[in-house]
């Protein structure tokens, strides 16, 4: 059974998330209302997934995610955010957080996100991808040349998947658009990330945007 740590300074959010996840078969082994308590809980319980609010007293979600490598190396961080601070979202993308989900998401999306991160995949809400792509300014010429060189390594079908991913589409939406199964899309996305040297879908989407700019 997948175990989860829920860290958020809003008790109502914590209880709501716990209810959704436990109804889906996950086990909430610990909750925390500040960053230091989250690290201590992760070290004690070693959960599969740590669901982290970006803004908590003491230490925010990004700082907690960084320290998880020492406190609980096998725990993967899933950031829970309302996008109050867009700079933190971009910082988390650059640091390779395992996933991002909005507090306004549906219960079904939250379950999907936790399940994907627990399975070793990255989960990025399509809304997150679209927001990040809209925030980042065009890159310099050297950065664009690097992006082009890396994207050029992709096969035609991989490039098609990358372009759809860069639109902020989910795996299901890519599957429908490209006329392939979700399982096949997952395989292509993993292959694209590996070839591009990207930690997650947003990094790949940014690279694709740079190559087109």
Image (cartoon, rainbow, N blue to C red):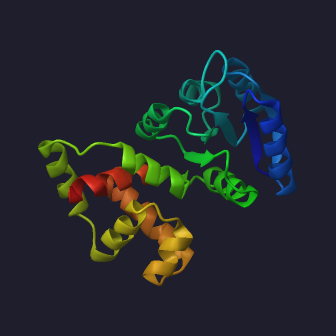
Q: Is residue 114 visible?
A: yes
Residue 38 occupies which quadrant of the picture? top right
Which residue is depicted at the point 82% across and 41% down?
A: 28
Residue 96's place in the image compared with 175, above or below, is above
Is 56 on the left or on the right of 17, as rendered? left
The outermost residue toward the top is: 58
Would residue 136 appear left or right of 126 to someone viewing this image? left
Vertical arrangement, residue 10 with respect to residue 144, above or below: above
Among the 4 quarters of the image, the one containing residue 33:
top right
Observer-nearest of 155 and 14:
14
Residue drawn at point x = 52 percent, y = 72 percent: 173
Q: Nearer the viewer, residue 23 or 83?
A: 83
Residue at coordinates 75% horizontally, 42% vertically from top-left? 4
Can see residue 200?
no
Between 124 and 188, the one lying in front of the other is: 124
Residue 102 in percent (x, y) is at: 62, 47
Q: Residue at x 20, y 63 (%)?
A: 152
Find residue 183 and report its horizontal and vertical position in percent: 55, 74
Specify the quadrant of the image occupied by residue 52.
top right
Number of dots carrying numbers: 0
Residue 22 % position (x, y): 85, 50
Quadrant of the image for the C terminus?
bottom left
Q: Is residue 141 above or below residue 195?
A: above
Q: Position of residue 137 (x, y in %)?
A: 28, 42
């Amino acid at each position: 059974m997948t175990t989860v740590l829920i860290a958020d300074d809003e008790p109502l959010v914590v209880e709501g998330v716990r209810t959704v996840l436990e109804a889906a078969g996950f086990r909430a082994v610990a909750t925390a209302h500040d960053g230091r308590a989250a690290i201590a809980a992760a070290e004690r319980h070693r959960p599969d997934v740590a669901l982290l609010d970006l803004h908590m007293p003491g230490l925010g979600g990004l700082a907690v995610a960084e320290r998880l490598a020492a406190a609980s190396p096998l725990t993967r961080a899933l950031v829970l955010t309302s996008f109050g601070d867009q700079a933190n979202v971009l910082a988390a993308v650059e640091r390779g957080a395992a996933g991002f989900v909005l507090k306004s998401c549906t219960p079904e999306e939250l379950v999907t996100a936790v399940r994907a991160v627990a399975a070793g995949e990255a989960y990025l809400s399509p809304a997150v991808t679209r927001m990040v792509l809209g925030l980042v300014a065009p890159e310099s010429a050297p950065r664009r040349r690097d992006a082009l060189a890396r994207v050029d390594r992709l096969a035609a079908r991989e490039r098609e998947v990358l372009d759809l991913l860069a639109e902020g589409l989910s795996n299901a939406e890519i599957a429908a658009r490209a006329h392939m199964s979700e399982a096949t899309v997952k395989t292509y996305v993993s292959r694209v990330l590996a070839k591009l040297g990207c930690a997650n879908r947003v990094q790949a989407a940014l690279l694709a945007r740079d190559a087109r700019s």
